[in-house]
Image (spheres, helix red, strand yellow):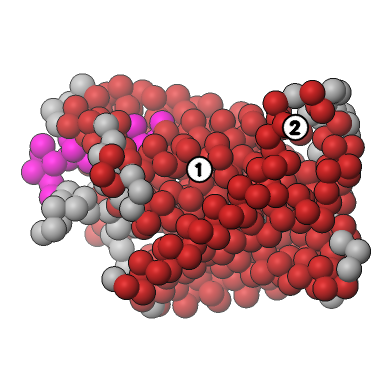
Amino acid sequence: MAATGSAVGLGNIWGFPTQTANNGGAAFVLMYVAFVCVLAYPALMAELVIGRHTRRNMVNALPSVAAKPLVKSIGSFAGLCGVIVSSLILAFYAIVAGWMMANILSSPASALGLPAYSSWLADFSVSRNLIFCLLFSILTASVVANGVRDGIERWSTRLMPTLILLIILLTSYVLTQEGAVRGLKVYLLPDFTHIFSPQLLISAMGQAFFSLSLGVGTMLIYGSYIREDENLPLVGALVAMADTGVALLAGLLIIPAMFVALAQGVQIYDINNALIAGPGLILQVLPLLFNSLGLAGMAIAVIFFSLMVIAALTSSISMLEVPVAFASEHFQLSRSKATWITGAIIFANSACIVFYFDFLFDAVVDITTKYSQPLLAAVLCIFAGWVLHRDRLLNEIRSGYNNVEFSWFWKIWPVYIRFVCPLLIIVLFIQSILTRLTA
Ligand code: PHE
């Protein structure tokens, strides 16, 4: 439940449709699904197994499985990188979650006859971004500081089916509108000439790791909470399927909705004939959709954005957990002190991003999600595959999954995390750097 709460968040409903539009549609969707199966699921398993085996956080877990001093140091270093990357992800994530919070209030404000206030809430501005980012950060920190995470997670898993139902209903409505079929084609019929473009591949890989919360130690911590009698490959598969399902569904809503907007005269292509897909994409498309539904649309907007904020919250608390666990153990701080101090440092980063948005936002998103998460996930695969090694891996997975040694999972996965995952990640990484340099 907690791991699904961490995985399902803005990455699915904001990140995935935006990236899909950015990378031309169905070719991206196809490669994203492929990467979830061949890279992200095996990497998720590596994190869960290391977490349950060591019952520690990433900074302490990796050195604890190694014997040689050099490998121990590499482990601690990777763990520290995880702490930093997780904090940086939270720094931009809280800004986007703040946009969702502001949008909850925007339509009620216009219904109450406060148009200036309503457009301040809906439009991009430093003041709005900063205030709502601060509110969301305080919300996240108070949940983590007061240790009420369990309650929030239980609450949110009950509410998530409502969000999914709402997306399904909105999708059915959108698909009846003029222009939707064109959007559906863009979303579902891949242009095979684009499939192996290095930028598409690295974006699809990064999105898969981001959406499953990998590489930064979140899933490792959740692995450390899992009981001995739980079947890890099954838990991992359920989390990956739920997460991918929600992303695909959100794409099915947003991409056709963009084309419905086009049919209504909204510009969605730029001068190069590429889809316009900045970070604000869903906030341009969804309000149009809600407005076309009249009064009911206002209620739907409030419910939709509230559910988005809850989904974002279960992800953001899992991100904050990583630096908080580290700070409270290493500096012997109380949990609440550790939370407010790390929270304040992260908010200071968010504020810098808000002030230099055009310059920093995309850069921080790219550095953390496209490059750092996959590379750190490769290190985790190497630790699981080469350092933990077969016997310890087998023993760990066997608890909760009898006879795993005769399963397909055991035939494929160990080879995968030893060779395929690290090599593929590194090749894609180098290829993307080279194309950037030559572009
Ligand atoms: N997976 C989360 C989402 O899709 C984001 C996340 C990334 C959470 C890294 C934790 C760690 O919104």
Relative to 163, is 292 on the left or the right? left
* Residue for badge 2: 410
Q: Residues within 10 Å of mark 1 (few under 14, many from 20)?
A: some
**Front-lying residue, 253 or 398:** 398
Task: Indicate which disc, 1 or 2, sits on the residue closer to the N terminus.
Answer: 1
Q: Nearer the viewer, mark 1 or mark 2?
A: 2
Per the rendering, the mark at residue 35 is: 1
Residue appearing at x 49%, y 54% in the figure? 206
**What range of the chain is rendered magenta?**
249-267
Measure the alpha-carbon separation of dots 1 and 2: 20 Å
Residue 178 in magenta?
no
Where, by quadrant of the figure, is residue 13 drawn? top left
Q: Secondary structure at mark 1?
A: helix
Eyeballing the image, is 377 above or below 183?
A: below
**Relative image position of residue 122 (x, y in whole percent):** 31, 55
Q: How many marks?
A: 2
Going by the numbered disc 1, the residue's amino acid type is Phe
Q: Residue at x 69, y 38 (%)?
A: 413
Q: Amino acid at mark 2?
A: Trp
- Can residue 44 be seen? no
Q: Main secondary structure of the magenta part?
A: helix
